[in-house]
Image: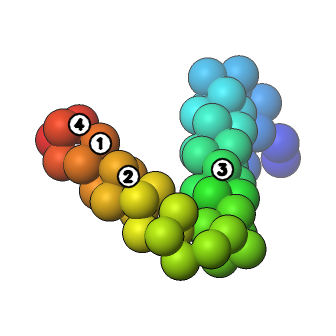
């Protein structure tokens, strides 16, 4: 029964965990951006946009 869900597969579990951590990090950065002053928020979002474009 566990195998049918793919939870017993270590590589799949690691992939799921990595995805969850990635989403969690995005949520944290969004919260941090909101709680900071506008100038800093604009700078961080622009920096993030630049790094995303560089990644592609």
Q: Nearer the viewer, residue 43 or 8?
A: 43
Residue tagged 1: 51
Q: Can see residue 6?
A: no
The residue that appears at 63% across and 36% down in the rendered structure is 18
Q: Earlier in the sequence, mark 2 or mark 3?
A: 3
Q: Earlier in the sequence, mark 4 or mark 2?
A: 2
- Residues under labels 4 and 1: Cα distance? 6 Å
Residue tagged 4: 55
Mark 1 in CB contact with mark 2 (< 8 angstroms): yes
The residue that appears at 18% across and 38% down in the rendered structure is 54
- Residues under labels 1 and 2: Cα distance? 5 Å
Q: Earlier in the sequence, mark 3 or mark 4?
A: 3
Q: Nearer the viewer, residue 33 or 7?
A: 33
Name the spot of residue 26 as percent of width and height, x first.
Answer: 59, 57
Name the spot of residue 49 as percent of width and height, x first.
Answer: 29, 56
- Residues under labels 4 and 2: Cα distance? 10 Å
Question: In terms of secondary structure, where does tag 1 sit?
Answer: helix
Q: Residues within 10 Å of mark 2 (few under 14, many from 20)?
A: few
Colour approach in the figure:
rainbow
Name the spot of residue 10 as percent of width and height, x first.
Answer: 71, 22
The residue that appears at 77% across and 30% down in the rendered structure is 8
Q: Compared with residue 9, is residue 47 higher up or lower down, i.e. above or below?
A: below
Question: In terms of secondary structure, where does tag 3 sit?
Answer: helix
Residue tagged 2: 48
Residue tagged 3: 25
Mark 4 in CB contact with mark 1 (< 8 angstroms): yes
Residue 2 is drawn in which quadrant?
Answer: top right
């Amino acid at each position: 029964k566990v195998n049918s869900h793919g939870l017993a597969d270590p590589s799949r579990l690691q992939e799921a965990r990595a995805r969850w951590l990635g989403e969690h990090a995005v949520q944290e950065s969004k919260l941090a951006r909101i709680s900071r002053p506008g100038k800093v928020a604009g700078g961080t979002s622009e920096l993030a946009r630049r790094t995303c474009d560089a990644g592609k």
